[in-house]
């Protein structure tokens, strides 16, 4: 599925959920579904700066023309946010990731308003790391 198709599915899910309490629960459940990270994954080289919680994004080799990564966090809500980003961008062409207007999408689903300023900064940092992986893949 394309980034846009993934975004449409996420948008539909958020529209189905009645309020932000249900949406937070959904985001937390997404985070709980992430595979556990190994000690090798939690190295400083993979750590995302600018996040209040610890977040790691580990690029995966052998993905061909697709951007592929593993990710996780030590905080439950942040794990959900990185899982949401992985749902949107993992195993996608770098060009699609770079062309997609993620801030507009976050605004459209109300995520930008629902997060504290600190969490929103962390989300932007995670997005920036994924976009950097996409840039490296397209070069």
Image (cartoon, helix red, strand yellow):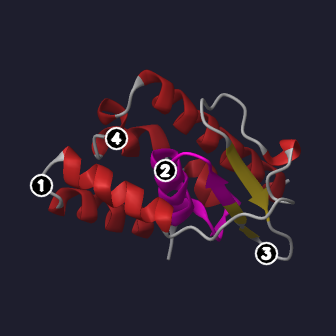
Q: Residues within 10 Å of mark 1 (few under 14, many from 20)?
A: few
The residue tagged 1 is 18
Residue matched to label 4: 111
Please state the horizontal and vertical placement of residue 55, each as a whole percent of the image: 66, 45
Query: With 38 as the anchor, is 51 left or right in this view?
Result: left
Q: Which residues are magenta?
A: 71-94
In this rendering, is residue 103 above or below 59? above
> Element type at marker 1?
loop
Residues at circles 4 and 3 in contact by the CB criterion of under 8 Å: no
> Any magenta on residue 74?
yes
The image position of residue 79, as x and y in percent, is 53, 52
Q: Residue at x 50, y 70 (%)?
A: 33
From what the image shows, is residue 113 above or below residue 80? above
Label 4 secondary element: helix
Secondary structure of residue under mark 2:
helix
Q: Position of residue 57 (x, y in %)?
A: 72, 53
Asked if the residues shown at circle 2 and circle 4 are in contact, with their CB atoms under 8 angstroms apart, the answer is: no
65 relative to 77, above or below: below
Q: Earlier in the sequence, mark 1 or mark 4?
A: 1
Distance Cα–Cα, label 2 vs label 4:
16 Å
In front of the other: label 3 or label 1?
1
Q: Residue at x 67, y 49 (%)?
A: 130
Instruction: Please check the rendered image and state whether residue 8 is part of the magenta-colored stretch, yes or no.
Output: no
Residue at image point 62% right, 32% down: 51
Of the image marks 2 and 4, the number of the one nearer the N terminus: 2
Q: Which residue is mark 2?
A: 76
Chief secondary structure of the magenta span? helix
- Residue named by callout 3: 63
Position of residue 91 in the picture relative to residue 3 (left or right):
right
Q: Earlier in the sequence, mark 2 or mark 3?
A: 3
Residue that appears at 48% across and 32% down:
119
């Amino acid at each position: 599925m394309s980034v846009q198709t993934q975004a449409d599915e996420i948008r539909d899910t958020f529209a189905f959920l009645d309020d932000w309490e249900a949406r937070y629960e959904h985001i937390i459940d997404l985070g709980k579904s992430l595979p556990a990270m190994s000690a090798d994954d939690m190295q400083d080289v993979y750590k995302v700066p600018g996040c209040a919680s610890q977040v790691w994004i580990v690029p995966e080799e052998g993905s061909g023309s697709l951007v592929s990564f593993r990710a996780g966090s030590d905080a439950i809500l942040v794990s959900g946010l990185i899982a949401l980003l992985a749902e949107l961008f993992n195993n996608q062409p770098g060009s699609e990731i770079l062309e997609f207007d993620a801030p507009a999408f976050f605004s459209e689903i109300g995520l930008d308003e629902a997060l504290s300023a600190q969490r929103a900064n962390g989300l932007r940092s995670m997005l920036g790391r994924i976009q950097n992986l996409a840039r490296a893949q397209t070069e």
